[in-house]
Amino acid sequence: MDIAIGLPNTLHINGQDVVEWARRAEARGFSSLATIDRIVYPSYDSLTALAAAAGATSRIRLFPDILLTPVYPPVWLAKATASLDALSGGRLTLGLGVGNRPDDFAAMERPVERRGKLMDETLDLLHRAWAGESVTGDEHPVGPEPAAGNRVRVLIGGSSDAAVRRTVAYGRVGPRAGRAPTGSGR
């Protein structure tokens, strides 16, 4: 049985204590460390906290639960997640969702009313970038190869029809993986 535990990135806790928490969770046999993602909240950034945990551990999986995908610049997100996956030896499972808190979107200067469309665009860009395709219009990829070579494991959060469509489109393995069917919605 796999049992995950939350990494206390949203608590008022010393950064070294977060790292020690990760070490202790791994030593006690937990399968994964999960974070809660928020922008407008006095918390540690999910990907940064997981990177620190990755450096302090060797086997425990890393899981941002659930990263507010549309608030992040897509090219940066592709590079950061490929980097974390590669540096951790493929221990990242990227939990992604659209989010719905207007303050997080406002802080990042992203339109909350376009979150579904931004999510679709970001998912497409992530998968193309991880596959080594140019996403910036020049000949160079934006990041390192993920540990598996061309993708990071993705878990899509949500219960809407659009979330199900995204899960089917981006959860597939094979030659068509990473290409979303057309459609709209959150």
Image (spheres, helix red, strand yellow):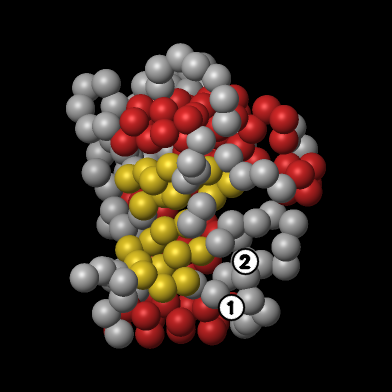
For the C terminus, the quadrant is top right
Q: State the image coordinates of residue 127 (x, y, percent, origin top left).
A: 39, 31
Tag 1 near tag 2, CB within 8 Å: yes
Q: Which residue is mark 2?
A: 44
Going 54% across and 82% down the picture, which residue do you hit?
16
Q: Amino acid at mark 1?
A: Gly
Residue identified by numbered label 1: 15
Q: Is residue 170 left or right of residue 135?
A: left
Residue 85, given in percent of the width and then of the height, sits at: 36, 51
Instruction: Give SS at disc 1.
Output: helix
Q: Earlier in the sequence, mark 1 or mark 2?
A: 1
Q: Which element type, helix, strand or loop, lies under badge 2?
A: loop
Q: Which residue is painted at 54% across and 84% down in the image?
A: 17
Q: Residue at x 29, y 27 (%)?
A: 177
Q: Position of residue 92 (x, y in %)?
A: 36, 54
Q: Which mark is residue 59?
A: none
